[in-house]
Amino acid sequence: MPAAPARLLATALTVPSLVLGGALAGCQTPPQPPANGAGQRSPTPAAVAGVVRAETVARGLEHPWGLTFLPDGRMLVTERPGRLRVVDPSGTVSPPVAGTPAVAARGQGGLLDVALDPRFAESRLVYLSYAEPGEGGTAGTAVARGRLSADATQLENVQVLYRQVPKTGGGNHFGSRLVFGRDGTLFVTQGDRYSERERAQDLSTTIGKVVRIAADGTVPRDNPFVGREGARPEIWSYGHRNVQAAALHPTTGQLWTVEHGARGGDELNAPVAGRNYGWPVITYGRDYSGASIGEGTAKAGMEQPVYYWDPVIAPSGAAFVTSDRYPGWAGSLVVGSLGTRTLVRLVVADGRVTREERHLEELGARVRDVAEGPDGLLYLVTDASDGRVVRVVPAGR
């Protein structure tokens, strides 16, 4: 990926198109267009029924957080308390995979995302993001990798590749999603640790940042802050609150992220190298007390979101639809919602969201992650003490 793509304008007109895709029944009010350099606000559409439905694949997972597919069609699923499971397409859930790192399983912390090395067929390397415990009750987002044994029962030669700096107290806002770029580098999304939000603007820390590292944990030489005094060289973009959804555009290779706002202000962004996304100086949200945050909704030198939600959806997990299994959905960005308990579909053209739909309200579950399977269907994990893996199928199937 280039080190410095073109700057995102306030109206997001330079953001690459996601899809020119078709409409479905149940069209919602179009999103509000940006005005005077402001971000584009969701119209908060009602949920659409009868387009897709959910089939339960597996049950009994404790707060599953991330999922990815092995080449043979089985899934690796993380459980926030610290377990990694192998889930067979038939629904069989394996015993915990041995060798996973110790996690700080408190609050929003624990074992988080899972991703396969782009050359997994040869390397068998699995990457995990998690809340790593530190001294004195502190914790921070970390990334480790290990080699999955041939029988998929153990991670071998596990090594920590990245640690958020510094570790802090509290159990909130760890992020974290793992996305490999086309060039084999790894994006790691993080949070501001809730009580440390001012550090999202501090380039000497990696709190509230998206970072980019090589697959072995080293820093790519074309990262935007390499060689800048007082700045962490692994930083890709900054000013983020809590990024729990991320996906790579299948055509352009652009990273897209969705982050939690406070009371209002969930954001869709396409982070550009070296750019400042404003938190907590600018935001469309307010504090949970009702108090204002920062200096307003816009400031010179700080990027506007492509799209924002107020009220929030509480986003977690995202994927681009590349298959033709769902009529009109190819190219869409789908986002899990913890708050509305739906699957949110976004159609974007010319850098603007032209349509938002919400599906699977009848599932009544917090959608924690979403991935496209090798069969072209979408799979979800639901965040609950008795969490599920769910297959999303067209309603007429």
Image (tube, rainbow, N blue to C red):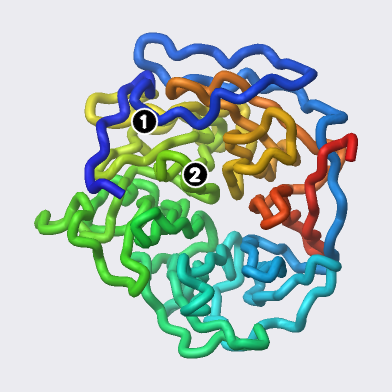
Q: Identity of the amino acid at label 2?
A: Pro
Residue at image point 36% right, 10% down: 36
Structural crowding at the residue carrying mark 1, measured as other residues with C-alpha within 10 Å and reported as few (<14), some (14–19) or many (≥20):
many
Q: Is residue 175 above or below residue 282?
A: below
Image side of residue 274 versus residue 373, left or right:
left
Of 50 and 306, nearer the camera is 50
Q: Residue at x 70, y 75 (%)?
A: 85
Residue sitting at 53 percent across and 65 percent down? 115
136 vs 151, nearest the viewer: 151
Foreground residue among 327 and 308: 327
Q: Position of residue 358 (x, y in %)?
A: 72, 31
Residue 272 position within the rendered picture, expressed as x and y whole percent measured from the top left: 31, 40
Q: Which mark is residue 282?
A: 1
The amino acid pointed to by label 1 is: Ile
Q: Secondary structure at mark 1?
A: loop
Q: Which residue is mark 2?
A: 250
Q: Is residue 136 visible?
A: yes
